[in-house]
Amino acid sequence: MATAKKLKINSDFLRMLVILVVIIIAATITSGSNFFSVISFQTMAKQLTEYGLMSIALSMAMITGGIDLSTVYIANLCGAIASLTISAIAPEGQILGIIFACILALALGLCCGALNGFLVSVVGVPPMLATLGTYELFSGITIVLSNGQSIQVIPQFTVFANVEILGIPLPFIVFILMAVIFSILLGKTAFGRRMHLVGVNPKASRFAGINNEKTIIMAYMLGGLLCSIAGLISLSRVSSVKADFGSSYVMMTILIAVLGGCNPAGGWGEIPGVATAVLVLQAISQWLTAVPWINGYYRQALYGILLLGFMTYKFYRDKNMGRR
Amino acid sequence: MKKLLTLLLAVAMLVTCVSAALAEGYEVLNGFDPANFKSEKDPSEFKMAVVVKGVADWFSRLEEGVTEFAEKYGVDAHVEFPATTDAASQLEIIDQLKTQGYDAIIVVPNDSAALENTFADAMEKGIVVVGPEASNLKNCLYDTEAFNAQTNAVAKADALIEATGGEGKYAIMVGYTTAITHMDYATREVEYLKEKAPGLELINDGAIPTCESKESTTTAYEQAKQVLKANPDLKGFVCHCSTDAAGVSQAVEEMGLDGQVMIIGAGVPSVYAEELKDGLIYCVTTWDPKLSGYVACLTAYKVLIGEPVGDGTDLSDGGAAPGYEAVKLVLDDGNNCLLGSAPCVATGENVDELF
């Protein structure tokens, strides 16, 4: 319990865990081996990585009281740059060239995040508008780079997403690794505490001697880094990148962050809850495909109900608890 | 903070290095032989899924064809509708279907490039992949198409001859002069008409096209009005973009030229049902997605039972899919296309039975 407290494993996390177990049981009962099989879990693990990482990125922004709508487009931009660099300097799949391209993409992710953070904290643009602007900017750059077409990556690069260690897909290991690192970062370090405080009350945090600008820029930069990792994984899994690939993830990441316990007004939210919410959403999605009589018409509606229901419940509960 | 950032970067780099070191040339190939996809199962146990682009009338019509096929053959075939038109949604559904014991996955791709990898893998696992309306998808056994450019152009040109009696002036409207298919259709129509109906004259000394709608109904309306003012004796108007006929018919009606100007439209017939019945629009050419769905399922079925499919195969299934009596096999840069000859012409009389 002591470790649990240290990592801030809170009620949001536990609740999500319970929901996850319930969904897995319900799905197994209703669709049997269509849902409950090793290959099915491997597929889920592989699919969720990209928006899982983006959800963590978004949660960071949300905790500081902002939002990040540009996550998907940072990922695509980084993927496009990596793919183009690889084609230019390592067309035969030379390892050094690939590593260089990846580092370049990760650095670009940090820069994109820094731009978001700068606009939000220093310039003072409301986060929703700032990241909506950069969303257009990043997707625009990707469109120009790709002429609006898909950019293919060399086949050697697609190995990454297909590697399995003890049957667990490598992308999922990356996701878990990042979830753990960011859980510790936000739950245990002074930086994490500063981020929360900036989100709760920027004025108080300033008087407490916290450099708000630096904290916010850092949060968005780390988010940008996560997005670029997501972009590289997506590039490897899909073997191509397009400016608007994954546009449906934008709304999905917001849904996940809120389900995972982040307060859209800032200040509250922990990564373990968010990471579990990622699993919940992926399980629901897999379940919907495994049950043929629920068709895609209901998918969107179901997500909407989930989000509204959960938010209503949470705000009601928080009001009773005297929080906000 | 710096320490943590360095750590993060180091981890990310490590992961990348591991992956790069493991690179052993995973190739995406299209060298699959349909004969290897024969299933040992009883046909009544076949499971097929059809993944469409998204929720739209067009795909509901396609679903009718899939349902008809499923009922006729007693197989489990159904349509999956992605919640959004994002290529990622389609990929997600396909990846999930691959784990659920499907024998065939049929797909109308949004972005073929995003699906190549997953389909190469699916076919390695022995899943039959067929793509209707998937002319640039390489990792599929067959791409089934309703018609080629010539068939479509001839259908439109014949409709114009029928409507005008083969005499008088006509105009051609395309979406954009940069729209390759539109311009291709238009050029073929003019060629065909020159030969078949010399009495028909394309205005502006035969310049192709007469005007561009820029895929906007408003622009189509304005352009059509100018053309009609300059050529009050115009007899025919051939449209290529799915929204053109709406603008053109409005202009024709406003100028009181209905009955004189025959409009040959394109797009979804039910959108133009009223105009077709009033005779304001002569006909709308398209292809029937219901047949596309039916034929794609049938193709996958034939592969699964080990019946060869190729040049000259009858996919019409005894009248269920007219126009596909003898498909042509066209190999185009890795895409094995089965080409039907099934243009669909909607008029005031049959529009209610169409989609």
Image (cartoon, helix red, strand yellow):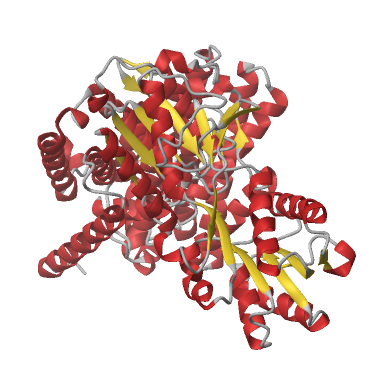
For the residue pair A10 and B355, the one nearer the viewer reads as: B355
Q: B225 left or right of A228? A: right
For the residue pair B230 and A80, the one nearer the viewer reads as: B230
Q: A201 left or right of A133? A: left
Q: Residue at x 57, y 54 (%)?
A: A115
The quadrant of the rendering that contains the N terminus of chain B is: top left
Residue A203: quarter of image:
bottom left
The quadrant of the rendering that contains the C terminus of chain B is: bottom left
Residue lying at the far front in this picture: please name it.
Answer: B165
For the residue pair A28 and A91, the one nearer the viewer reads as: A28
Q: Is residue A66 something that shows in the picture? A: no
Q: Residue at x 28, y 41 (%)?
A: A282
For the residue pair B74 and A145, the one nearer the viewer reads as: B74
Residue A36 in percent (x, y) is at 18, 29
Residue A16 in percent (x, y) is at 18, 46
Residue A216 in percent (x, y) is at 45, 55
Residue A3: quarter of image:
top left
